Amino acid sequence: MNFLQLIEQLTARVGRHQLPADPAAASIQTLVDSSALHYELATRIVRAIYEHNDCRRLTDPVGPEATFDALGPIRAALLGSSHTDVDAFHFMEEICAAVAKVFYKNRPGAINAHAPVAKTGGQEHPGAELVRLDRVRRRSKLLA
């Protein structure tokens, strides 16, 4: 898979409002449209993926290891910042999940679309288990 194909697939998975990429762009500078919801973060992510994969053209190949190496420091900075916008954090998580699905969708042990899904607060959490805290709280009050 090449860099432009990856960005197109990420755009399809997270939405054009999050990552409005122009497939006809001639360079990395014009790839992400300024209408992105988190423009600075989106451009930082795209540029990091490009650089960590040693791309010189939009059609250069990309791999999962270099791509995740690019995302790691950006994600860590968001998690460590006391001023991170919750929407920016969710966007970063969606990008990470989308990258995993793009690269590992057909590999053994990959993220399974048919894995059990727990729902809490209307959100789905693949493979998660819902733990009822009311029982734990009652038990801890009895022990106190």
Image (spheres, grey):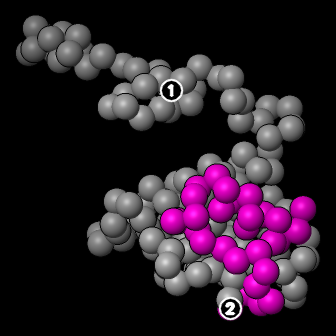
User: Within 10 angstroms of label 2, few (less than 14), some, or many (20 or more) residues?
Assistant: few
Q: Residue at x 63, y 66 (%)?
A: 71
**Residue 21 coordinates in the image, percent (x, y):** 66, 74
Q: Which residue is mark 1?
A: 128
**Residue 20 coordinates in the image, percent (x, y):** 60, 71
- Label 1 to label 2: alpha-carbon separation: 39 Å
Q: Residue at x 52, y 61 (%)?
A: 92
**Residue 58 coordinates in the image, percent (x, y):** 84, 80
Q: Residue at x 71, y 30 (%)?
A: 112
Depth order, front residue of 144/91: 91
Number of labelled discs?
Answer: 2
In the figure, is residue 17 to the left or right of 96?
left
Depth order, front residue of 99/38: 38
User: Within 10 angstroms of label 1, few (less than 14), some, or many (20 or more) residues?
Assistant: few
**Residue 105 coordinates in the image, percent (x, y):** 80, 40
- Secondary-structure class at tag 2: helix
In the figure, is residue 15 to the left or right of 104?
left
Compared with 129, 43 (above or below) is below
Q: Contact, CB < 8 Å: mark 1 with mark 2?
A: no
Amino acid carrying label 2: it is Gln
Amino acid carrying label 1: it is Ala
Residue 50 within the segment the image draws in magenta = no
Q: Residue at x 74, y 64 (%)?
A: 8
Of the two numbered discs 1 and 2 in the rendering, the one whose residue sits closer to the viewer: 2
Compared with 32, 101 (above or below) is above
Q: Which residue is mark 2?
A: 29
Image: magenta residue range: 1-29
- Secondary-structure class at tag 1: loop
Residue 72 seen in the current view: no
